[in-house]
Image (cartoon, rainbow, N blue to C red):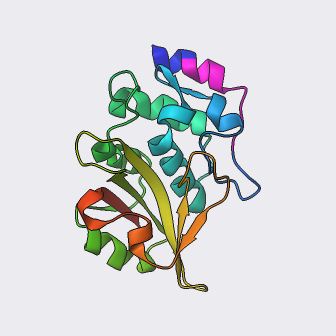
Amino acid sequence: MLEKRNFAHNKQFTPGDESGCINGQGTGEVAKMKYGICTMAWNGCEMIALYNAAHLLGRHEELRDICLEMYPQSSVLWGFFGSNPLVLDRYFKAHEIPFEKTYDYNAFFNALPDCRCGVLSFWNRRRVFGSLHTVMVRFDKDRGLLVEYNKFNGKTVPVPHDVRSLVTVKHLFIVGYLLP
């Protein structure tokens, strides 16, 4: 029921930059959108990562539609803790998007250059009792860089990295979805 009320609220917003992607979930229209009992500024990273990946794959679905669909399947404690990153594959399955799920840090980053993009979740500082973050990342072959979307709450552009450890480190990696 909460997802339907939030959907009605979220209809007034159209987040995304000129490329169509969303960065900086704590800024602009996306920060005012709701997911569960909170605003997307607090808990929207998983839904934003799905949105960004779908957009990069040429599937132009609205963020509010993704939230409506995924909230009953993935939210944790009415969305206060965002979404369970282990079940994001339900979105890919429902939309017939080919993917590979991995719990292996090196397997994810080694395969990423051969994929259109990936969605990954990681602990911010401490495993289990810390907070986690989910981002969409792609490998820019022209520049030889990893490009991370929605890295920081207030940074409204993608963040390029020349090494994977600037995205996250091995012991903080939770799960990754590779999208060929």
On the rendered image, what quadrant is the N terminus found in? top left
Residue that appears at 52% across and 18% down:
4
Residue bounds of the magenta highlight: 6-15
**Is residue 151 toward the left or the right of residue 33 in the image?**
left
Establish if 132 lies above or below 105: above
**Is residue 83 toward the left or the right of residue 172 in the image?**
right
Establish if 140 lies above or below 108: below
Q: Position of residue 146 (x, y in %)?
A: 50, 74
**Is residue 56 toward the left or the right of residue 70 in the image?**
right
Q: Is residue 58 visible?
A: no
Q: Position of residue 127 (x, y in %)?
A: 24, 48
Residue that appears at 28% across and 57% down:
172
> Is 124 colored magenta in this rendering?
no
Q: Is residue 2 visible?
A: yes
Establish if 161 lies above or below 121: below
Q: How many marks?
A: 0
**Is residue 9 toward the left or the right of residue 177 in the image?**
right
Q: Position of residue 157 (x, y in %)?
A: 67, 58
Residue that appears at 59% across and 39% down:
63
